[in-house]
Amino acid sequence: MTTQIARALALIGYFGLMLWVILWHGFISPSPHLSLTFMLIIWLPWLLIPIKGILQGNPYTHAWSVYLLLPYFLHSGVLLWTDEGERWLAIVELVLASTMFIGNMYYAKLRGRELGLSIRRKKEV
C-alpha cells in the first residue's frame, strides 16, 4: 500500500462516516424519541475533533484519531447483533469506520517513515 492510497482510504472513511451519521440520524432512520440536534451532538463531535490535522495530513493526528472510532465500532456491532431493521445501516457504518481505521493506520505508518518519525529502540552496546 502506498501513502497516497492510505490517505485516500482515510479521507473516504472519515468524510463518508461524517456524511453517513448525518444521513442516518437525519433522514434515513431518525429516532422517534430523540431530536436530530441531540443525535448529531452525540455522534458528530467525535469526528470533528481531528479535522484540522487530518486535512493537513498530519501522521500523528491520523494515528491517534483511530481511538475516536471506538464508539462507531461499538454502535455498529451492537446494532448488527440486536436490530435486524437497521442492520444494513450498521454494516455501512462498520465499513466506513473500518476504512478510516485501516487508512489512518497505514497513512500514519508510511508517512511517518517518509518523514523519519519512527520510534526505535536504542541498540544495546
Image (cartoon, helix red, strand yellow):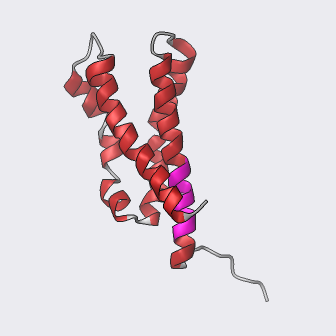
Residue plotted at (27% across, 10% down) = 32
Q: Give the quarter of the image for residue 81.
A: top right
Question: In which quadrant of the rendered image does the N terminus lie?
Answer: bottom right
With respect to residue 120, does 25 lie above or below? above
* Res 117 seen here: no
Count of all numbered marks drawn on residues in the image: 0
Q: Residue furthest bottom?
A: 125
In this view of the protein, can residue 6 be seen by the observer?
yes
* Location of residue 56 (image quadrant): bottom left
Task: Indicate the position of residue 57 as horizontal and vertical percent values.
Answer: 40, 64
Query: Quick check: 50 left or right of 67?
Result: left
Above or below, 14 against 75 in this view is below
> Does the magenta portion include 19?
no
Judge left or right: residue 18 versus residue 67: left
In the image, the segment drawn in magenta is 102-111
Residue 119, picture quadrant: bottom right
Along the line of sight, the residue nearer the viewer: 122 or 76: 76
Image quadrant for the C terminus? bottom right
- Main SS of the magenta segment? helix
Which residue is painted at 68% across and 76% down in the image?
121
Q: Residue at x 51, y 32 (%)?
A: 94
User: Residue 106: where, in percent of width, then height?
Assistant: 57, 58
Provide residue 93's location: percent of width, then percent of height: 46, 31
Q: Does 104 lie within the magenta span?
A: yes
- Residue 29 location, x and y as percent? 33, 16
